[in-house]
Image (cartoon, rainbow, N blue to C red):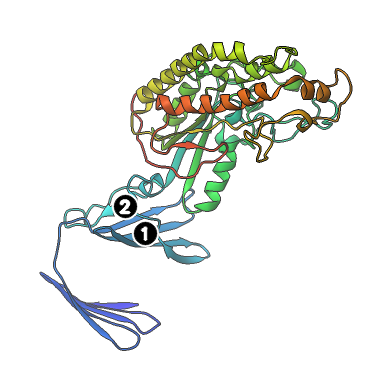
Amino acid sequence: MGSQVGNELGLANAAGASLTVSLGDTAQGVVTLPDGTELPFTAAPTTEEILYRAETMAEGGDAGIVAGWIKLGDRVQGSLSLATTSGTTLSAAPDLVINNPLITGLFPTPLTPTTLGSPAPNNVTFFWAAMGDSYAAGEGNPEVPISNPDDRNNFSGLRWGNDASHFVSNSGATQADDSFTCHRSDKAPAVKTQARLRETFPSIGFKLGFVACSGATTNDLLDGGYTGPGTKTESLRGNARVAQPAQLDRVKNFVTQNGGRLDLLYMSIGGNDFGFAKIVEDCYFPADARELGCMPDQAAALPATLTRMRQGLARVDEAIERKFGTALPVFHSRYPHPLDNGTTRNPPVCLGDDYKIRGETGPAAADDFIKNNVSDVEASFLYGLLDELNGVVEEVGLIRSGGQLDYATITRPAASNAVGEA
């Protein structure tokens, strides 16, 4: 509580602390602590950016946010007030990191003599998009799985994603058509991260544009026409298989629909250019009686494979820069090791009795065939290919302002960006 008479200002709190200050060419006053200790001070006016203030409404207009910071050299302290219909809470403000979009969304204004009369407008919604292949789309983790997991030819009960909040329109196709075509799941990494961000930062709005498609290559980020993985018609459950626009164009449409703002782009891409699934298939089927199995042939083809992947990722990088500028943070998830058995074996690759997929044993049964078909050398070679794949992504420089992420993990957005080319 406080009072003001002319240039004299007094403030006090319930604990017994008080502040009295006289304002003029300089500010002079006394801070009195609850124990009676008096701390006199004098403050001269300055044009330096020391005091910052932000005021906005959260998405939906149901909560007011006021934040303030004092920045002296490397020392920064701040507080944030969140006012809702149920009351006001006061907490420490997030760190004043100007290139953090969770802060720039508040547009903190330095309070100097030239800015006091014209506070900056603010927007507290964080816009981001997710694109890429099966790891980004959520392949293998539908919203609702098939009713009978033992009958792999019966797709009864299957449902992919139906959360309309992150659906980006596709030439009149329904969301069901689109999600069944691409196996785009509401349990995909980006969608789960979206929910976690909303939970962690309740005073900030988050808007996700989700366009990933299972089986996509770098070409499908750049060019339209892809119709999803080659699955059985029955798996569509009556929905249409629809052609996909270029994913980057679709992200651009999402940005345009939301006022030209994009704060972060997440993706998983390159694995299908690399052909990892086909390499694994070649090494597992048919059985190869040679001592080194598939390794010599695949190792000989690897340089050309890596070159093709580099070229595709470089084209994506150039397109991102052209459409969204160079300041946009781009996060790419690492591809996990699907052959990792979780042991301390070096490398911890699946071998022999590790394969007990469905308990199908005996000659020509799945478990027995895989268990006896892959040599230690082949398995170790396949395991190392993931390091080659992930290394190319880093080498091309596709990742900006945040580094590469472990699969399904988005940790710290890094910068805010107003997009460039139309």
Farthest-out residue, right: 362
The reply to whether discs 2 and 1 touch (Cβ–Cβ < 8 Å) is yes
Where the N terminus falls, by quadrant? Answer: bottom left
Q: Which mark is residue 278?
A: none
Q: At which x and y percent is residue 210?
A: 54, 31
Farthest-out residue, left: 25
Q: Closer to the camera, 414 or 127?
A: 414
Q: Closer to the camera, 32 or 89?
A: 32
Q: Residues within 10 Å of mark 2 (few under 14, many from 20)?
A: many
Mark 1, residue position: 67
Q: Is residue 299 above or below residue 85?
A: above
Mark 2, residue position: 108
Q: In this view, does 380 lie above or below 41?
A: above
Residue drawn at (51%, 37%), measured in percent from left and top? 208
Callout 1: helix, strand or loop?
A: strand
Q: Is residue 335 above or below residue 26?
A: above
Quarter of image, res 281:
top right
Q: Is residue 154 visible?
A: no
- On the rendered structure, is 34 left or right of 269? left
- On the rendered structure, is 405 left or right of 327? right
Q: At which x and y percent is residue 351?
A: 73, 29
Q: At which x and y percent is residue 238?
A: 75, 20
Farthest-out residue, bottom: 36
Which residue type does callout 2 highlight?
Pro
Return the disc, 2 or 1, that comes first in the chain's sequence. Answer: 1
Q: Is residue 107 above or below residue 279?
A: below
Quarter of image, res 139:
top right
Residue drawn at (55%, 11%), measured in percent from left and top? 301
